[in-house]
């Protein structure tokens, strides 16, 4: 038996638990962000990095450094994304559920 899904959503960073939904909720309050998705990326030392994918609203400009500055004021350091990556569309199911495995696959392909 294999467990897939939400148990893998928890990101453990330097001994702290970061829940993607918390980080996504804050990112989604930024005026230029339409929707975001957060995943963990394993590191060599056994920790995970917080990686954010963002879909920008039509007509808005993507400024990763401005978004990072926005998050510095609103998230604890261990919850802040190490990378913020813009995607044209966040992959979802027909019912709107985020397909985070596709995002993790995109990260793996970048290496």
Image (cartoon, rainbow, N blue to C red):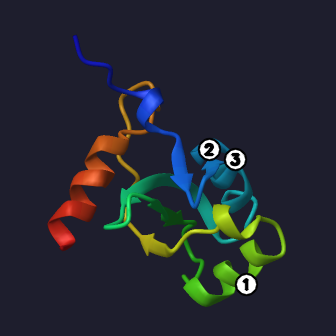
For residue 19, the mark is 2
User: Could you tell whether 22 is left or right of 84 in the image?
Assistant: right
Quadrant where the C terminus is found in the figure = bottom left
Horizontal and vertical percent for residue 63?
A: 58, 86
Residue at 22%, 53% (x, y): give it.
105
User: Could you tell whether 41 is left or right of 6 in the image?
Assistant: left
Using the numbered discs, state the Cα–Cα distance from disc 1 to disc 3 in whole angstroms.
17 Å
Name the residue nearer the viewer: 19 or 37. Answer: 19
**1 or 3: tag closer to the N-terminus:** 3
**1 or 2: tag closer to the N-terminus:** 2
> Which residue extends farthest top?
1
Mark 1 falls on what kind of element? helix
Name the residue nearer the viewer: 3 or 71. Answer: 3
Residue at 62%, 44% (x, y): give it.
19
For residue 22, the mark is 3
Horizontal and vertical percent for residue 30?
A: 73, 67
Horizontal and vertical percent for residue 38?
A: 50, 54
Cβ–Cβ under 8 Å for marks 3 and 2: yes
The reply to whether residue 83 is visible in this rendering is yes
User: Image quarter for residue 47?
Assistant: bottom left
Mark 2 falls on what kind of element? loop
1 or 2: mark nearer the eye = 2
Name the residue nearer the viewer: 36 or 1. Answer: 1
Q: Which residue matches tag 1?
A: 69
């Amino acid at each position: 038996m294999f467990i897939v899904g939400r148990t893998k959503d928890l990101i453990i960073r330097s001994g702290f638990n970061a829940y993607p939904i918390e980080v996504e909720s804050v990112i989604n309050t930024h005026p230029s962000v339409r929707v975001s998705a957060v995943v963990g990326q394993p590191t060599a030392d056994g920790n995970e990095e917080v990686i954010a994918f963002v879909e920008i609203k039509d007509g808005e400009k993507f400024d990763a450094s401005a978004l990072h500055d926005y998050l510095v004021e609103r998230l604890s350091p261990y919850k802040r994304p190490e990378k913020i990556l813009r995607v044209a569309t966040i992959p979802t199911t027909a019912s709107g559920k985020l397909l985070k495995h596709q995002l993790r696959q995109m990260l793996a392909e970048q290496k």
